[in-house]
Amino acid sequence: MEDNKVLCGANFYEQKFYMNPVYEVLPQSVKDELKIMCVLFVQEVSGIIILEFNEAGDLNIVVTAKDSDAYFDEIGSELKVRRLRKEKAELFSQLEEYYKAINE
């Protein structure tokens, strides 16, 4: 997991969105889409969402929550991750291609 590179993430608890400065060169429309997607995700299910690239360049969606978070919807988050993977498949594929191209 140490070798994974964070693309972006949102934290419900701190009400913050993070975009890794390494990827600031991405088109503004892509950055906006990622921000909206992540922020809406944590607003709906609570917790923290992180999009990260693994060593192979695959984009993973990691969702965590505080143990004390009674509002975190674990089942809802799993369903939402599946829906994101389906609805954003083209975007995720393009991001994976971009990541692999800049890390060759």
Image (cartoon, rainbow, N blue to C red):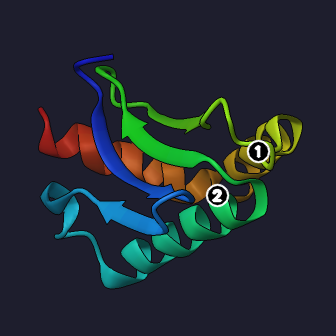
Q: Is residue 48 left or right of residue 8?
A: right
Q: Label 1 is placed on what type of residue?
A: Phe
Which residue is rendered at x = 73% and y = 58% of the image? 87
* Residue receiving disc 1: 72
Q: Quadrant location of residue 67?
A: top right
Q: Return the residue nearer the eye: 7 or 15.
A: 15
Q: Is residue 46 left or right of residue 5?
A: right
Q: Quadrant location of residue 51?
A: top left
Front position among marks 2 and 1: 1
The quadrant of the picture occupied by the C terminus is: top left
Q: Return the residue nearer the eye: 73 or 69.
A: 69
Disc 1 residue crowd, few under 14, some 14–19, many 20+, Cα 10 Å:
many
The answer to whether residue 79 is above or below residue 60 is below
How far separated are the C-alphas under marks 2 and 1?
23 Å
Residue 47, numbered circle: none
Q: Return the residue nearer the eye: 74 or 24.
A: 74
Query: Which mark sits nearer the N-terminus, 2 or 1?
Result: 1
Disc 2 residue crowd, few under 14, some 14–19, many 20+, Cα 10 Å:
some
Which residue is rendered at x = 14% and y = 45% of the image? 102
The answer to whether residue 62 is above or below residue 24 is above
Q: Label 2 is placed on what type of residue?
A: Lys
The quadrant of the picture occupied by the N terminus is: top left
Residue 88, numbered circle: 2
Which residue is rendered at x = 68% and y = 35% of the image? 68
- Judging from the image, what secondary structure is the residue with disc 2 in? loop
Which residue is rendered at x = 21% and y = 60% of the image? 23
- In the rendered image, residue 92, in percent from the top left (x then y), is placed at 51, 50
